[in-house]
């Protein structure tokens, strides 16, 4: 939702400390706080009673796990964002005064007071009453852009001075619970699952029907490669790739889903880890001699290997494999993987530079296709400097397939009551590339 940078040393401090809740009011300095170490984490703030609990998230096999950071605060904050300039999280105190807060790696919250020029809760704007800033994110200009779901206005804050430097009139209220900047726009999701695009330059707000189910998406963040994570309050994370972002008809593809904790008061942000090169290879093992055909009914097992070529560690990845027609009873026992119909979808966790992760999926060559051709792909959480190896080598298995069913062949070619089925004898082959 909303994110802000720390104020510079020397700004006025509020002389109050609530140590038990991890809350400190003051100007704060780099030496007085502990910055986060960015490894591509997701951060989640959830309401607990009248306060907020911060969590750090770790991508895993089929799920995203969260670990509490520090204690629950004594009052509620929202609209958090990760500031890569100093590796702190910032948010807006939601109960009153639209105050700027900073959260460090221990969960300690430092308050800087009300943002100059930011309307206070209860202000009527465009016919709607402001209840508090709950939507926001840093733009490419380094300013924090904030708004509220029901308000047709957005404000850009210079967090170094704790001052609004630009007011942007929106064409309509965003109706989103969180937003994040990616590919030239801010993005969020409405309660119907529509994806909302906000132009920070013109104030244009547009909603596009998408594949997201209806729900409240209180946590929205970016992956390192520009994909957007939509985290609904029911506890499900949808990873969405956006193409043609600036056109009249952008396209949205759900890359993967992961489960996580639910909450009625979600807010999310993330930090972007350095780029790293993930690759994938795929081989088939039908357990038959390379020189022989693969008979109908053979169980074919594919092994997919995800490799991190470096130079950095990966915080996680998604794998997709559309298995071919002619392969029935497809199953997998690999953690984090599911098969829907003939589609394999997997998510995995951290993969350090030089490490491998292995996935297996099996099916039966049922004889309805002479060749089984498929390709697997991997999509890392971080930017990938070498996308050419994100798709596996094509694997082709040729099977013995009856060209004419035996019963029909008996009628056509039967001699003295002896029927036979004409079969095409093919040699199995596996296409490989260097």
Image: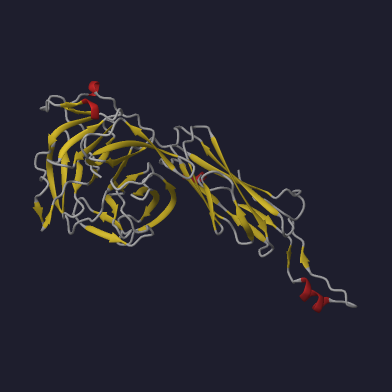
Residue 337 drawn above or below residue 34: below
- Indicate how the structure is coloured in the image: secondary structure
Percent coordinates x, y for residue 344 in the rendering? 54, 52
Look at the image and tell me whether residue 22 can be seen: no
Residue 372 falls in image quadrant: bottom right
Q: Is residue 121 left or right of residue 333?
A: left
Q: Quadrant of the C terminus?
A: top right
Q: Residue furthest top?
A: 31
Q: Residue furthest front?
A: 49
Percent coordinates x, y for residue 150 in the rendering? 18, 55
Tell which of 62 and 197 is nearer to you: 62
- Residue placed at 71% from the left, 55% from the top? 298
Tell which of 15 and 174 is nearer to you: 15
Tell which of 173 and 191 is nearer to you: 191
- Residue placed at 16% from the left, 42% from the top? 95
Q: Quadrant of the N terminus?
A: top left
Percent coordinates x, y for residue 45 in the rendering? 29, 40
Residue 324 drawn above or below residue 56: below
**Total numbered labels placed on residues in the image:** 0
Look at the image and tell me whether residue 166 can be seen: yes
- Residue placed at 10% from the left, 54% from the top? 125
Percent coordinates x, y for residue 414 in the rendering? 85, 76
Q: Is residue 194 left or right of residue 372?
A: left
- Residue placed at 28% from the left, 25% from the top? 34
Residue 428 falls in image quadrant: bottom right
């Amino acid at each position: 939702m909303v994110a802000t940078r720390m104020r510079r040393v020397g700004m006025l401090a509020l002389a109050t400390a609530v140590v038990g809740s991890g809350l400190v009011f003051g100007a704060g300095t780099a030496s007085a706080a502990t910055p986060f170490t960015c490894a591509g984490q997701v951060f989640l703030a959830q309401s607990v009673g009248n306060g907020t609990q911060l969590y750090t998230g770790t991508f895993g096999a089929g799920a995203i796990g969260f670990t509490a950071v520090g204690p629950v605060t004594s009052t509620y904050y929202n609209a958090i964002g990760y500031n890569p300039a100093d590796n702190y999280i910032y948010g807006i105190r939601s109960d009153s005064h639209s105050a700027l807060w900073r959260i460090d790696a221990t969960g300690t919250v430092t308050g800087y007071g009300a943002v100059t020029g930011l309307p206070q809760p209860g202000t009527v704007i465009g016919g709607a009453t402001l209840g508090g800033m709950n939507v926001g994110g840093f733009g490419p200009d380094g300013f924090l852009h904030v708004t509220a779901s029901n308000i047709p206005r957005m404000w850009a804050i210079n967090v170094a001075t704790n001052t609004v430097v630009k007011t942007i009139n929106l064409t309509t209220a965003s109706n989103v619970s969180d937003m994040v900047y990616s590919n030239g726009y801010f993005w969020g999701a409405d309660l119907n699952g529509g994806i909302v695009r906000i132009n920070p330059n013109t104030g244009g707000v547009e909603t596009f029907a998408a594949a997201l189910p209806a729900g409240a998406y209180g946590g929205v963040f970016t992956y390192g490669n520009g994909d957007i994570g939509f985290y609904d309050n029911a506890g499900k994370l949808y990873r969405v790739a956006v193409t043609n972002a600036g056109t009249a008809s952008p396209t949205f593809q759900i890359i993967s889903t992961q489960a996580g904790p639910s909450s009625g008061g979600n807010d999310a942000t993330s930090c972007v880890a350095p780029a790293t090169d993930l690759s994938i290879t795929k081989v088939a093992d039908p357990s038959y001699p390379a020189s022989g055909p693969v008979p109908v009914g053979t169980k074919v097992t594919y092994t997919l290997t995800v490799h991190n070529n470096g130079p950095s560690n990966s915080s996680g990845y998604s794998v997709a494999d559309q298995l071919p027609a002619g392969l029935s009873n497809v199953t997998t026992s690999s953690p984090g993987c599911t098969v829907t119909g003939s589609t394999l979808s997997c998510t995995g966790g951290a993969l350090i530079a030089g490490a491998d992760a292995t996935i297996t999926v099996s099916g039966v060559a049922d004889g309805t296709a002479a060749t089984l051709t498929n390709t697997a792909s991997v999509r890392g959480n971080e930017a990938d400097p070498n996308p050419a190896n994100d798709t596996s080598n094509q694997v082709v298995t040729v099977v013995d397939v009856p060209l004419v069913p035996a019963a029909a062949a008996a009628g056509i070619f039967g001699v003295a009551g002896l029927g036979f089925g004409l079969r095409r004898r093919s040699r199995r082959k596996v296409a490989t590339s260097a």
